[in-house]
């Protein structure tokens, strides 16, 4: 399901969660290019079947442990174009279900990528720059 470029605010994401929970086959959500905050991401984390989440070009930070905790079921996460600080990026190590992450080229230092790979050797990290 794609809601990319919808211009949704946090309250919109909070309101849609009950509807998303009624879609039994929903596993992928593209919320890219929305002013998505950590609070909205926590709301989306309440959709238990979401495995593939694209939040590229949003304002999430992953700094809050509650956000990371709500996303335990996510297997693939796209963060391309997100401005995430180094410490917050390391929080991905706590997302136990995460197997694949996409991040902007040079958005995260090589040492942080190496640390994340050391702690989570099975995590596949792909660097890319998409518009």
Image (cartoon, helix red, strand yellow):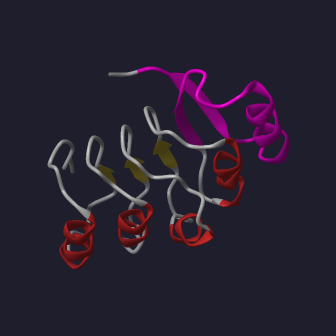
Q: Which residues are magenta?
A: 100-129
Quick one: which residue is furthest to the left in this view? 6
Instruction: Judge by depth and name the residue closer to the eye, 97 or 116.
Output: 116
Residue 64 percent across, percent down from the top left: 58, 66
Residue 126 magenta-highlighted = yes
Residue 13 coordinates in the image, percent (x, y): 25, 67
In front of the other: 10 or 32? 10
Asked whether, in this view, residue 114 is left or right of residue 51, the answer is right
In the image, residue 95 lies at what x, y percent? Answer: 63, 59
The residue at 21%/69% (across/down) is: 23
Q: For this view, does 83 lie left or right of residue 31? A: right
Tell me if residue 103 comes above or below residue 8 in the rendering.
Answer: above
Q: Is residue 116 magenta?
A: yes
Work out whether 106 lies above or below 43: above
- Left or right: 5 as drawn, with respect to 67: left
**Which residue is drawn at the image coordinates 45% and 20% (left, top)?**
129
* Residue 125 left/right relative to 59: right
């Amino acid at each position: 399901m794609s809601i990319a470029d919808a211009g949704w605010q946090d309250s919109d994401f909070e309101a849609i969660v009950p509807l998303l929970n009624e879609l039994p086959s929903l596993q992928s959500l593209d919320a890219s290019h929305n002013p998505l905050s950590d609070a909205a991401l926590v709301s989306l984390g309440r959709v238990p079947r979401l495995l593939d989440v694209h939040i590229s070009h949003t304002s999430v930070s992953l700094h809050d442990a509650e956000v990371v905790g709500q996303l335990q079921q996510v297997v693939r996460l796209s963060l391309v174009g997100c401005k995430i600080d180094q410490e917050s990026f390391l929080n991905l190590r706590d997302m136990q279900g995460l197997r694949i992450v996409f991040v902007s080229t040079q958005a995260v230092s090589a040492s942080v990528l190496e640390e994340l790979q050391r702690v989570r050797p099975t995590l596949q990290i792909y660097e890319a720059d998409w518009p």
